[in-house]
Image (cartoon, grey):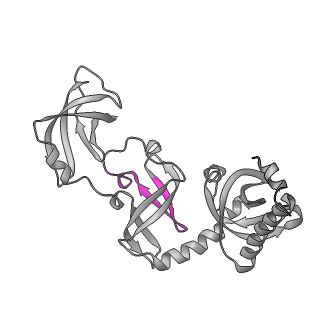
Amino acid sequence: MSDHILSTLIEGFDPDKIQQEEYDKDWQEIIGARQNNTILQAYATGIEKTLDKECLIVQVGRVRGLIPIDFSGCEKLEQLRKLVGTKVAFKVLNYDRENNLFTASRKAALEHMANVTWSRVEEGQILMSVVRDVMPWGIKVDIGGVQVEIPIEEVDHGWIDDLYEKVKVGDHLRVKVTKLDKENKTIKVSAKQAKPSPWPECAKRYQEMSEYVGRVSGVREYGVFVNLEPGVDALCNHLKFEHVRKNDRVLMRVLKVDPQKEQIRGRIVRVL
């Protein structure tokens, strides 16, 4: 039975009234947030240029909101674009119900959240973060309004050849607080240390001078990385008469296993 037929069978059903009630509810949430200085969250759906300034568009139900770039916490348009498609926090600055529009500040929300985070965070704590930027050398995450950079070596166990393949903007990552100075508001976190390490247990699975199947996870001037299992990559010399490529399956001989340094050195026997 279609929704239209069903609606005619319900006494007193008025679609327009339902829509108006939902619309009023959206505005009640927006006005309430403005009056109480509370934080709202909504998905960023696009970017518009208004009064010669780029504005991030957010949608609270049927009501559109604009976050000018000056109030977004971003310095460049490229950074603003990375927020599109993700859920962002903001505070309502003012509203125009007649034109079904409000303006908001993400920057104010981040500052509010950061103050709360600094008061509660402790060293050794496991926290949830959101990836805000991905660079060749590391990622930038948001932890309750606090922006932190994580170097590539602290993103995950094992060799990471390309961070853009590993994480994306908007991903949620568990991170561990490794260093904290609340007085100077500096913090270091590691996504790798928030995950179980394959070491030293994996050392029992690979015997020196034995051969194992692996997959090439990276090729560099100084050698070839071969992935043996998640988080475990061996470094091998280049083959003399053959070039290997990323994702090639190879047979590799283990030459040395060092559990303390969490390293395996090997030699590629042949490409499979």
Q: Position of residue 68 (x, y in %)?
A: 73, 60
Residue furthest to the top: 241
Residue range of the region highlighted in magenta in the rendering: 139-157
Q: Nearer the viewer, residue 163 or 43?
A: 43
The answer to whether residue 270 shows anywhere in this view is yes
Q: Nearer the viewer, residue 254 or 49?
A: 254
Q: Identify the residue at horizontal 29%, vertical 29% (top origin).
A: 249
Image side of residue 162 versus residue 62, left or right = left
Q: Position of residue 22 (x, y in %)?
A: 78, 64
Magenta-colored stretch includes residue 72: no
Q: Nearer the viewer, residue 42 or 83?
A: 42
Give above or below for 221 relative to 129.
above
Q: Position of residue 86 (x, y in %)?
A: 61, 54
Residue 165, picture quadrant:
top left
Magenta-colored stretch includes residue 152: yes
Q: Identify the residue at horizontal 25%, vertical 52% (top origin).
A: 198
Q: Identify the residue at horizontal 88%, vertical 61% (top origin).
A: 99
